[in-house]
Image (tube, rainbow, N blue to C red):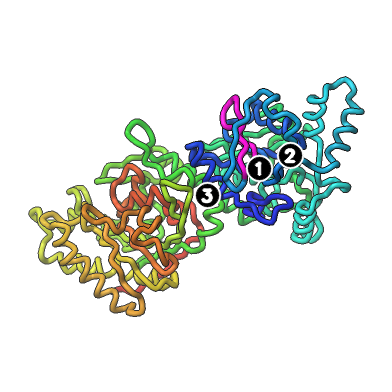
């Protein structure tokens, strides 16, 4: 319902809205333009639609609902492109024209053509408001017009009502469903609605609801973590924040706007997870030193990402290790740790989540921490287009020898070299890591493990070159682990200087090395022993950084934001 409502066009068998978005982005150069049915104004004249979009209430890139033009046919949408212009774009992306603010530029001759129910409604409204001009009456009438009245219920609205009534066993009423936009299933209160809106792409909106003052409002995600509340008549707008929202005291609401709808428990958990992720993301350094945060779209789409992918994530650990230690190691992660440089607000991490540094520190005091890996299926975003693909990735931790402060360095390096007596431990560590990767591949039902070396660049022991470390530790470990999972095929995915076949995310798009048969493959990401998945993201030049800046691994692979993540014990090597 949620996805269909964003692409539905009345009386049209299909609506290629993605094509519209792509073509409009290409024409405008604005990658954030998502203008799909964000303004639910039940107006019927072309002039009034344009006039409403031009009001100061609505920001740039707001769009009208899709309509069919009377002259020439075809489906169109109006998009506010700047303070003085509105652009009319055809849904198939082939036509576009700019309309200036002066009414003479569009006039009533371009009326897209709607049914007679609006005309009857406007006639009744004018008769009851004899002192108003035609334009004033059109504005007033548009705020009260309902296409889903008993007389003019449309096919789509009728189907939606029937669906909701069937899902609720007949307990829900139709109150609050006017100007239906995004369909969230069974919404119950304003806080839940706010949470859902923050999970949607920029400029998407909630359905309209009625406040205590008997006026209709709508929530709109305007990006940068902000949500505004807009009155349907376009006269009032205010920014709302989660701190002002409460389950017991929803602002301006008499109660659930679908009477009888219970609070969905799953969505309450989802809401809590997304709030935790938002808090975590804010703790990353994002100032003059750089922006180390995961992508904004991951926070914006948190709820929908969790709904689709959360159950696919797993923490893999070695059988016999303490599960409590494993859970601590997976949960108590530092947002960013690059060569022991911590690019996050340590005090806020303590205040919000109860720890200052990663559990790796404490768990290293009495030996080596448990070995873990985290696997998930995540969307990966093409940085140059709106395209995304789904990719399975298992995140492996290598031993850290980059600086002397690392616990691994202090335990295993002697006189500036990897001690000979410690090399067997390193070999077995690597075999165990790749055994976790093969098991993750098996559990995910994938046929191919695309192996990338771990610990072979910055983390390699002093005195080793990358080829030397790979030859002595990486490829023998892969071969040894592979013997336990002979049904899984192995392919090498190489990242780094002079290696261009595993350049995430480009390798997954436009004929890249790994752009085909992604549903058969599991990829390896070289993770850090301290950090969240993705580590420094776009400020991090490692493979982990490229994964972090391009995907949702930071959300899906952290138990704090994904409480449904499963724990899987794997045989010890």
Q: Is residue 506 visible?
A: yes
Residue denoted by label 1: 76
Number of marks drawn: 3
| Residue positioned 79% across, 25% down in the render | 135
Instruction: Report which quarter residue 292 is drawn in.
Output: top left
In whole angstroms, how far apart are the C-alphas of marks 3 and 2?
37 Å
| Residue positioned 49% across, 52% down in the render | 561
Q: Looking at the picture, how far across and down is residue 550, in whole percent?
A: 40, 50
Q: Secondary structure at mark 2?
A: loop
Please tell me whether residue 79 belongs to the stretch shown in magenta: yes
Q: Quadrant of the N terminus?
A: bottom right
Q: Looking at the picture, how far across and down is residue 148, in whole percent?
A: 81, 47
Q: Residues within 10 Å of mark 1 (few under 14, many from 20)?
A: many
Q: Nearer the viewer, mark 1 or mark 3?
A: 1
Check whether the beta carbons of the residues at disc 1 and disc 2 lie within 8 A of each other: yes
Residue 302 is labelled as: 3
Residue denoted by label 2: 112
Query: Going from the N terminus, do you reach mark 1 or mark 2 first?
Result: 1
Q: Secondary structure at mark 3?
A: helix
Q: Nearer the viewer, mark 3 or mark 2?
A: 2
Instruction: Report which quarter residue 94 is drawn in.
Output: top right
Q: Write the start and end of the magenta stretch as one range.
A: 77-90
Q: Nearer the viewer, residue 77 or 363?
A: 77
Instruction: Report which quarter residue 134 is drawn in.
Output: top right
Q: Nearer the viewer, residue 365 or 552?
A: 552
| Residue positioned 33% across, 52% down in the render | 544
Q: Looking at the picture, how far across and down is residue 16, in whole percent?
A: 60, 52
Q: Nearer the viewer, residue 550 or 350?
A: 550
Query: Going from the N terminus, do you reach mark 3 or mark 2 first?
Result: 2
Check whether the beta carbons of the residues at disc 3 and disc 2 lie within 8 A of each other: no
């Amino acid at each position: 319902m949620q996805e269909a409502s964003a692409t539905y066009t009345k009386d049209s068998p299909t609506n290629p809205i993605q094509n519209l978005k792509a073509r409009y982005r290409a024409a405008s150069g604005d990658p954030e333009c998502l203008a799909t049915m964000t303004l639910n104004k039940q107006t019927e004249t072309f002039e009034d639609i344009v006039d409403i979009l031009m009001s100061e209430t609505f920001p740039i890139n707001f769009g009208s609902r899709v309509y069919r033009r009377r002259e020439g046919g075809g489906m169109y949408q109006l998009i506010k492109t700047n303070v003085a212009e509105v652009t009319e774009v055809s849904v198939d992306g082939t036509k576009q024209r700019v309309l200036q603010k002066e009414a003479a530029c569009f006039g009533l001759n371009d009326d897209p053509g709607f049914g007679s129910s609006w005309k009857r409604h406007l006639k009744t409204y004018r008769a009851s408001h004899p002192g108003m001009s035609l334009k004033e009456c059109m504005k007033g009438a548009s705020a009260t017009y309902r296409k889903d009245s008993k007389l003019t219920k449309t096919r789509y609205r009728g189907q939606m009502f029937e669906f909701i009534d069937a899902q609720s066993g007949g307990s829900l009423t139709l109150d609050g469903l006017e100007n239906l936009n995004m369909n969230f299933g069974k919404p119950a209160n304003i806080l839940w609605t706010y949470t859902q809106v923050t999970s949607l792409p920029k400029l998407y909106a909630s359905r309209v609801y009625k406040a205590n003052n008997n006026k209709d409002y709508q929530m709109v995600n305007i990006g940068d973590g902000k949500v505004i509340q807009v009155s349907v008549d376009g006269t009032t707008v205010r920014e709302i924040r989660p701190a002002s929202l409460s389950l017991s005291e929803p602002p301006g609401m008499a109660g659930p706007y679908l009477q009888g709808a219970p609070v969905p428990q799953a969505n309450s958990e989802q809401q809590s997870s997304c709030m935790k992720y938002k808090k975590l993301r804010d703790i990353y350094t994002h100032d003059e030193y750089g922006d180390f945060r995961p992508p904004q779209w991951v926070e914006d789409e948190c709820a929908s990402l969790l709904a689709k992918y959360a159950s696919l994530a797993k923490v893999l650990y070695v059988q016999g290790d303490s599960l409590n230690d494993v859970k601590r190691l997976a949960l108590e992660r530092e947002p960013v740790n690059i060569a022991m440089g911590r690019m996050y607000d340590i005090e806020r991490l303590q205040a919000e989540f109860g720890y200052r540094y990663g559990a790796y520190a404490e768990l290293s005091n009495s030996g080596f921490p448990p070995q873990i890996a985290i696997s998930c299926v995540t969307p990966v975003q093409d940085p140059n287009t709106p395209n995304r693909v789904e990719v399975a990735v298992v995140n492996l931790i290598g031993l850290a020898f980059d600086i002397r402060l690392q616990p691994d360095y202090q335990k295993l390096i002697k006189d500036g070299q990897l001690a000979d007596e410690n090399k067997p431990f390193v070999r077995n560590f690597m075999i165990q890591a790749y055994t976790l990767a093969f098991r993750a591949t098996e559990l995910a039902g994938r046929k191919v493990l695309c192996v990338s070396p771990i610990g072979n660049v910055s983390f390699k022991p002093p005195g080793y070159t990358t080829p030397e470390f790979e030859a002595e530790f990486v490829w023998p470990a892969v071969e040894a682990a592979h013997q336990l999972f002979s049904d899984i095929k192995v392919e090498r995915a190489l990242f780094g200087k002079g290696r261009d076949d595993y350049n995430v995310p480009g390798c997954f798009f436009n004929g890249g090395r790994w752009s085909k048969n992604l549903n058969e493959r599991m990829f390896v990401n070289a993770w850090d022993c301290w950090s969240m998945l993705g580590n420094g993201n776009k400020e991090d030049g490692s493979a982990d950084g490229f994964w972090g800046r391009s995907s949702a691994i930071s959300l899906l692979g952290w138990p704090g934001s994904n409480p449904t993540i499963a724990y899987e014990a794997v045989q010890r090597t």
